[in-house]
Image (tube, grey):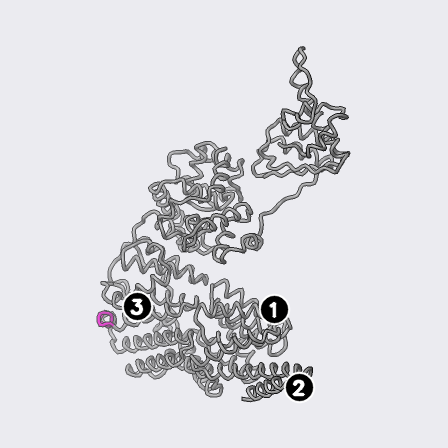
Amino acid sequence: MTAPTGGASVAHIAPTSPFKLERLSALLPELALHTTPVPMRSGPPVPHEQERLHLWEATLGLLGALSKMHPLLLVLDDLQWTDDSSIELLTYLTHHLQDQRVLLAGTCRDGELTPQHKLRTLITDLRREQAITTISVQPLTHTQIGTLVSHLPKNIVQSIQMQAAGNPFFAEELARYVGASHSDEDPLAPIAFHEQSDIPSHMRSGLPHQKVDRDSSHSSRSLPEAIAAVLERRLSRLSNGCQILLGKAAVLGGSFELSQLVPMTNEQDEDTILDQLEEALHAGLLTEEGTGAHITYHFWHPLIISHLYGRLSAARRAQLHRRAAETIKAAYLSSQQEKVAASIVYHLSRGGGDPSTVAYYAEMAGNQAYSLAAYSEAQQYYLQVLQSLVSNESHPQEASDAHTQIQKITPKAIIQLPFTDPLHICRLLEHTAECSMVLGNYEDARHLYECVLALRTSEDFQRKRIASTASSEEMQQQEAQIQALLWREIGNTWAGTSEYARVYECNERGKEVMSRAGVTSGAAWACLHLQYGEMLRLEGNYQEARQALQEALEMLERVVQQSVAPHQEANSIQLVRKQETLATTESTPLPTPKELQTRTERALIGDPLEIGNVHERLGIVAACVGQLSDALKHLHIALTIYEQSELVSEMARVCSNLGAVYILRGEHESAHKYMHHSLGLAERAGDLPNMSFVMVNLGDMAHRSGDLLESEGWYKQSLALSERINDRERISWCSVELAAVQQDLGNLSEARISLQRAIMTGRAIKSSRCVHYALVKLGDLRIVEAIINRNALSNDPANSLSQEACHRLLMRAKL
């Protein structure tokens, strides 16, 4: 405690004060400079209670005297740490200063107050007397934390937002820790070694909301010293047994149940565990929710989990992770293992589990994530399965991202592996490629599809394929259609980066494969015809595109109608069973997880998704030629089909298209609804192509509404995402729209740069549609520049240079 006022004020009070300031010198030694020493007198000792009362009266007198000179604010921080005698003094002061010009402001962490703490009694009494106002201070929001550390790179800000969990002190210390680090890698990665972003939020089952660190060396690093000191101080108030228990609970993650914790502590009985949990609850390190047999415990803060986990030795961690995995498996032995497969994979990976067991649960977790549109997580799990099968490793290689892992999967390596279930490998590769497509990683997707195609065309694969069926001709036709559909997917990866010539080449290759096998109709043929119609649309040949799309629609509708007939349904089931038979020719330690059909398998038996795709393309063509009612009709049909199958990415795309059509109709309220629904769906799936797409439309809507700065922001975000996925057509198109906004804002030089980029990009991809659109906007810009020069000329008629510049700009606009 320090003197609350300057020395001059105390010196003014001391000679005339009715109380003895020297009695406060034990608390405030600096007061001795302003008081007259009192000679020591012999006499009987003063009772302790009387001496304490004198001290309280002197303190009260000092504060009262100061408040008469100036209004006084006294701030008392961290009251949860005050001792009983200090609380008694505070109680005395609060009851005797209520008529003075004194405001006492105190702070405390109520989670750290014991039920018997005297501060609770004081607060209750003051509330009854209506002499206190309590304010609950909530944690900062993610946005507020982001503002606090906004000087850091975006990825670091996001990491701090997650780890600080609303605590400004932690956020500032983490930011300072980043500033002291000069490494090229994320300096917060070692802090997050016990985090699990590879498990979707809806699948984590109480695991910490953090990111798995692939580099085991990170586990030896610690939190920033200031944070570690705060956490250690809180833990030091607990018994040793309670601290050990919480360390084991930290392995389970951010939340856990008693049934999960008991097997982790074999040496203790349940009553002892409950006593230690109650101790942690009273100390505010845990909270609980639920009743009966379903009580869940939550850690107070994410960083306490990392701190506790870091205290454990590597061997102890591995042992506890293995116990956790076995506990979860036992709890879900009979059903719904897919819901906890992600947790099992995490613990087995960290505990050094058997690679085949890890692969089994990783595939199950990948299928679950895929079905929930968590494509980034699904891709991670599928890659973990592939790596386990290829290299017999249960954990992805250290510090390797998805792109690096995918590029290590080569067609040559895949073909040469002694697989007994090649169809299973094909499905895994295809699912991984499908995830890459949604995430906008077109190069990775193409690489994986080429691996699948190489495997399916290999002699060994064909020999096993034919041997698994009695009808080799039927199997060859089915195989030809699957290969043709793979060519379509490879073409789609080229379309994503606007390589249209390569798309046509892949389309022709697919049709050639089917023609050689005697297939000239059916679902696969219709799908390739759909792709051909889409390419015609992208080139601006709308009439030809509509005709090709209508033909594809008729073929697909016939296939779907036939597929619901009993005999065709039996054939479809037979196809799947034949593939499963080939995939399980030899026994495995664990049964194969229930497999999801790939997009090519679904398309081959008549997937309604393809009909939805045709209607969506027909709607876009209709909108491009001004037939907005027809466009809405087709787009709503497509949306209904997508919603029935819960196809999140397709729903996001068609909702954005619907919003664009409603903009053209001037129905901005409907446009706004569909646009933001689309953005929400795309963000949920991590679908970068659709996020980029809807941001262009949101920018257009803001531009039409006159919100130029908002529009510019949307276009710049869309451009950043388009550059990230190398969608060059959207880069060109978005640059034109951005130039129009920049022109309206008066930033003509920036508009000129944006248009130059649009034209160069359009020419690079040989898109006359993009180039022509950019040239029209460039003409508009030249006219605006000419008008500006003409206005300058009117102010200076003798300026021949302005006349010449105006004439030149108008001629360039005409061109």
Q: Nearer the viewer, mark 3 or mark 1?
A: 1
Q: Is residue 647 magenta?
A: no
Residue plotted at (34% across, 76% down): 487
Q: Can residue 565 be seen in this snapshot?
A: no
Magenta region, mostly helix, strand or loop?
Answer: helix
Q: Which mark is residue 798?
A: 2
| Residue wearing tag 1 | 709
**Residue 175 rendering spot, x and y as whole percentages:** 50, 50
Residue pointed to by mark 3:
579
**Residue 383 falls in image quadrant:** bottom left
Vertical arrangement, residue 195 with respect to residue 643, above or below: above
Residue type, mark 2 in image: Ala
Query: Residue 657: x, y in percent?
Result: 53, 75
Label 3 sits on a secondary structure element that is helix
Secondary structure type for disc 1: helix
Q: Earlier in the sequence, mark 3 or mark 2?
A: 3
10 Å crowding of disc 2: few (<14), some (14-19), many (20+): few
Q: Which residues are magenta?
A: 458-464
Q: Residue furthest top?
A: 43
Of badges 3 and 2, nearer the viewer stands 2
Residue at left offset 25%, top offset 68%: 412
Q: Whole-percent x and y of residue 237?
A: 50, 33
Camera sees residue 353: yes
Residue type indicated by callout 3: Gln
Q: Quadrant location of residue 104?
A: top right
Instruction: Using residue 439 as the reference point, say whether residue 703 is left or right of it.
Output: right
Above or below 650: residue 261: above
Graded by Cα atoms within 10 Å as few (under 14), some (14 to 19) or many (20 or more), the crowding at tag 3 reads some
Between the residue at mark 3 and the residue at mark 1, the CA separation in whole angstroms equals 55 Å
Residue 752 appears left or right of 513: right
- 267, 210: nearer the viewer: 210
* Residue 461 lies in the magenta stretch: yes
